[in-house]
Amino acid sequence: MNTNRSIVNKAGTIQTSVVTSGLLQPYQAKKFLKQTFDATPLMGAIRHETRTERKGEIDKIGIGRRLLRRKVENTDDGYRAQPKFGSIEYSCNPVRLPWEITEDTLRENIEGENFEKVVTDLMTTQIGVDTEDLIINGDEDVSTQYDTGEKDDSDQPIMAPNPDYDFIKLDDGVKKLISNGGHIIDVTGADDMEMEMFYKAVAAMPNKYNNGKLRWLMSPTRAQQWELFLLNKVINNGGIVPEALYKSPVAIPSMQVPNLSDDTVILTDPMNIIEVNTYNIKIRKDSTSKDAIMQDKRFYVVHFDLDTLIEELDATAMIVGLPAYNFQKSYI
């Protein structure tokens, strides 16, 4: 008989080979989520909250500044510092990842029955990668069509179905949330990257958040082109660029996020980004139903809930409209 604990192997990996009814116990759900958190550096850096209900509030607590007062011996003046309490509402959206494996694949694959575990591990990792993608790019108001950039005979834009619509619409991500309340530095029309855009982003944010915990989030391509931009500055103008500047513009470290587009750079404390999940996680497998028998395959699906929040929008800045790198100016 399969026990709850047997669902989690010694390495903490969830295996579908022992999952039938599906609903995981809280400790199992935590292990499954931990696997998804380890999928990317950003997923490991942001804040994660797990709740029992799909909708609710996450409490916030803050402390003011300049709270100290003079001490007078044998005197109580009645002064008391007060914490500041608040909350953020969350509403998790149910999502799923289904897949199938034919029995022929299991029989003929060199991994044999272990192939089922290999695929499950890959799917679990992909859940983490896709979750990061949603955390960054999700938009519940995304259009079903996109502009191809071409014109028809009437000089009207040619639209095409958005291939990512079913995915992007699942949740509102960080870019959408910051656009609706964070600090935006729009550099549309700029010919190239400039150091000034980073300083403008930092200046847009209150000083209290510039506390050593901020990080630049940018795509790997944008990070590499920033290095090339600085190298070209040295070649063209002479002088020396401090080595730290390549990885830490304005003395703030950068973090590469593959799911972030090249035209955007985000400044925030990663812990200011919150992923909310519920314990209502199901990993289900079917190998005995009529469809499974008739098609000679096994069906799998992972069900879970998620929502993306930003604790303090005032502690975010986003540089948008960054131009593609002008390689014609490169002398390397």
Image (cartoon, rainbow, N blue to C red):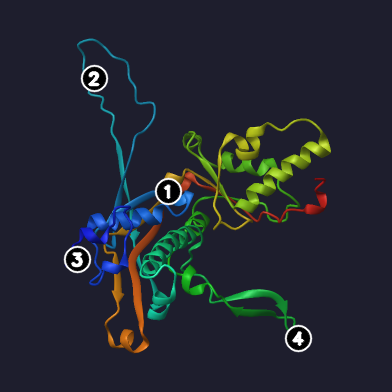
Q: Nearer the viewer, mark 4 or mark 1?
A: 1
Q: Which residue is mark 3?
A: 2
Q: CA distance from mark 3 to mark 4?
A: 65 Å
Q: Is residue 152 above or below residue 3?
A: below
Q: Which residue is mark 1?
A: 44
- Inspect the image, locate mark 4, and give the three-letter code of the amino acid beneath it: Asp
Rendered-image quadrant of the C terminus = top right
- Inspect the image, locate mark 2, and give the three-letter code of the amino acid beneath it: Asp
Instruction: Please identify the quarter of the rendering in which residue 54 is found.
Output: bottom left
Q: CA distance from mark 2 to mark 3?
A: 65 Å
Marks 2 and 4 in Cβ contact (< 8 Å) = no
Q: Nearer the viewer, residue 182 or 31?
A: 31
Find residue 102 and report its horizontal and vertical position in percent.
40, 80
The numbered mark at residue 77 is 2
Q: Nearer the viewer, mark 2 or mark 3?
A: 3
- Inspect the image, locate mark 1, and give the three-letter code of the amino acid beneath it: Gly
Callout 1 secondary element: helix
Find residue 136 and report its horizontal and vertical position in percent.
50, 57
Q: Nearer the viewer, mark 2 or mark 1?
A: 1
Q: Nearer the viewer, mark 3 or mark 4?
A: 3
Q: Is residue 193 left or right of residue 100?
A: right
Find residue 147 and report its horizontal and vertical position in percent.
64, 74
Q: CA distance from mark 2 to mark 4?
A: 81 Å
Q: Nearer the viewer, mark 3 or mark 1?
A: 3
Find residue 108 and report its horizontal and vertical position in percent.
43, 76
